[in-house]
Amino acid sequence: MDRCFFKMAALGLPVVIGAISAKPAAADDLADMRQEIQSLRQQYDSALQRLQKDYETKLQQMEKRVKAAEAKAQAAQDAAAAARTPPPALAQAEAPLPAGSAAPSPAPAAAPAPAPVPVASGGGTPASAGAFNPAIGAVLMGQTTAQTRNPNDFRIPGFALGDNAGQLPRGFAINESEVNLSANVDQALYGNLTLAFERNNTVGVEEGFIQTTSLPYGLTVKGGRFFSGIGYLNEQHAHTWDFADPALPYQAFLNTQYDDDGVQLRWLAPTDRFLEFGTEAFRGDFFPAGGTDNHNSGAGAWSAFVHTGDDIDESASYRVGLSHLWTTAKNRSTSGLAGTDVFSGTDHTYIADAVYKWAPNGNFVERYLKLQAEFFLRQEQGVFNASPHFANTQTGFYAQGVYQFMPQWRVGLRYDQVHANSLGRGFAGTTLDNLGATPRRYSSMIDYSTSEFGRFRLQYDLNQLRPQTDHEFIFQYIVSLGAHGAHQY
Amino acid sequence: MRKIPIVTFLFAVFALGATSLPASAKVNVFACEPEWAALTTALGGEDVEVFTATTARQDPHQIQARPALISRLRGADLAVCTGAELEIGWMPVLLRQSSNAKVQPGAPGYFEATQQVKLLEVPTRLDRAEGDIHPQGNPHIQGDPRNMQIIAAALAKRLAAIDPAHAAGYTERGKAFDEKLAQAIQGWQKEATPLKGVNVVIYHKEWIYLTNWLGMHEVGTIEPKPGVPPGSAYLAQLLEEIPQKNVKMVIYSAYQDPRAPEFISAKAKIPAVMLPFTVGGTEASRDLFDLYEDTIKRLLAGVAAHG
């Protein structure tokens, strides 16, 4: 109201001032003014009426036009729907489907364009910019965890650990919920981006790579950030793992998974038996590489691997592999209970992996068995803290079996252990002090899948990593939304 | 750094070895399912070498991307698959890992049967809450032999395009196959007259092309939703509905667990009929002609058993 008043006052003021500043008001002048005002008002009223009429007729015209357009759209939609609905029971009509559709060109002309999602909302509108959107998928993971020992004190005695190695946090927590975008870039390239959202509200690029699709001789080149092809589990995303946490050797040797920026070359041999060779060069920023300026020479980590596999019979198949990861580290620091350790030198990590799958008649719907094991060996040389001629050998392995005993239900057992040599009194108190023990873990799990897109898992770990035993219970969910890439073997 | 030249050298040696391998005179075909292997063999004869990725006893929706499949696809000149996302759970991985430009989607060496015919049961609501549905429509097109006629014509053309040296052979065999199938269809349709209007309960929504062809009606499914295994409450409800719907038999395929259909069969006192679904699903279904022959024989036996 106040504002209105001021506006009126502001408008009225000049008029009033004008009237006052005009010649002294006489009686006949006043009558003239009244007349003038009267005529002005009439003009104004008539103009207003004209405008109103104009507006109304225009509105009516527009309404008519909109109605006509709607009817047209409805007719078009009906026609499209009619074209999509299956023909009436063909059994009555003796003639087969129209011969014209025998052309190798995609489908009969009446069918809608081979758009991946022929839903009504997209009907009729021409292909928009969104038609070329990449496949989008999201994986949501989370769990609630109970441990008898504080997971913040997690250590594997005898091993310097990277920043990712560790137990799940206590209590409710989301765990690497990820978003994935993938599509062919063009006739020659494929691109894939996976962003991982962590519990502490950080976002990381888990994978972001391009890959060739049309090189000759069975060659594939990949570049960007990606999981290295070494071992078996390294290349697989966490949501496809059969246990809620990574196996101990993956934690101790590869900081859970070796994921870095680099290039990869793979060659698939032209044989009936699967035989694949690969080599990679990485930036080397991540454990077991790492440290300051580690990539002066262009790369700080290299790898080479070979995988082979085949069907044993209709029911069973296998894959085995050998891998070598060679990393350099410059002043790589890792923290232990008694402070920070610094290492400069080279690591050679060797992995032997084997996977065996069995299902009755090769039909994985009802029942199946999956056995896998990986063995790790690491040789480390260089300068550790103040020890100049440092050399160390560590080993580890895990073996696990998962059995689907009826549709939707699986059980699994896993045993992991890692072993570090005793390095003597000089290393007491450092991360490399093995405390005279061999860290090991026993895990068992049962999971239920609501469909191939949803899974709930209950897992129990008996951790014998530290001198004291730790019991760990995990209840986890894994679901996938939208486009979901096919799983690797 | 010393390592790089050695690895590069090794790759060079292998790559050279690969190029110098003698090229096979036959067209190497990777058939995703047995029906396409049978069709390609019928059209290709001696000119093709066919590898079948799956068997009739495996659910084609759920196949592992096995190492053997990757290496076989790598050497293929042509991949013949169903398409319409039937193989979405495994084929994309095989295609990407096979490093074979010849068989990538869009290339002449990639043939999808569902691209050739009109699909039925195109879902109007795309939501995973509806189960394992296929956006482009029901992909199990091999149930109707008239689909097979159309696909055979297209596949013969494709084979001729890929292997022009033997084009005349593909055309000839294609024509012969078409004539033989057209004649057989006439016979099957006559034979299947008693099946017209018969109500059936099916396991999974994979029979629409067969029931549509023979004029049968699907009035219930053992799976509450496509790909979702039945629970006991759902089966009890299905059993209640069966008497009201005049159901003559329960149909399931060679790769499905017979326990649920047999349970329904025993409780509702209607026969459970196992159909081959694809070539090799039964002893008798050795090729496509046997497949339709045996399917109709088994359905007729089911109707007869019910009285």
Image: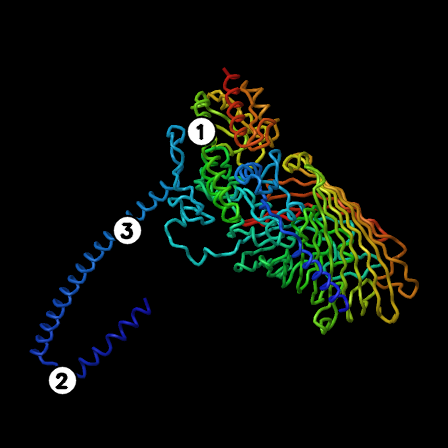
Q: Judge whether residue A8 can be spotted in this image.
A: yes
Task: Locate residue A82 relative to residue B163 in the image: left or right.
Answer: left
Quarter of the image for residue B90 reads top right
Q: Are marks 1 and 3 on the same chain?
A: no
Q: Position of residue A268 (x, y in %)?
A: 67, 54
The foreground one among A289 and B210 is B210
Question: How far apart are labels 2 and 1 at the CA level?
Answer: 112 Å
Q: Nearer the viewer, residue A3 or A51?
A: A51
Indicate which disc residue A23 carries: 2
Quadrant for the N terminus of chain B, please: bottom right
- Residue located beneath label 3 in the image: A69
Mark 1 vs mark 3, CA separation in Å: 50 Å
Mark 2 falls within which chain?
A
> Which element carries disc 2, helix, strand or loop?
loop
Is the same chain shared between marks 2 and 3? yes
- Three-letter code for the amino acid on which mark 3 is drawn: Ala
First in residue order: circle 2 vs circle 3: 2
Q: Secondary structure at mark 1?
A: helix
Residue lying furthest top in this view? B307
Q: Chain of mark 1?
A: B
Instruction: Give me the residue at 46% from left, 21% from top.
Output: B246
Q: Is residue B103 above or below residue A365?
A: below
B268 vs A59, left or right, is right
Q: Is residue A131 above or below residue B292?
A: below
The image's mark for residue A477 is none
The residue to which callout 1 is attached is B183
Pair 1/3: label in front: 1
Kindly report which numbered mark, 2 or 3, lies closer to the viewer in this rendering: 3
Amino acid type, mark 2: Lys
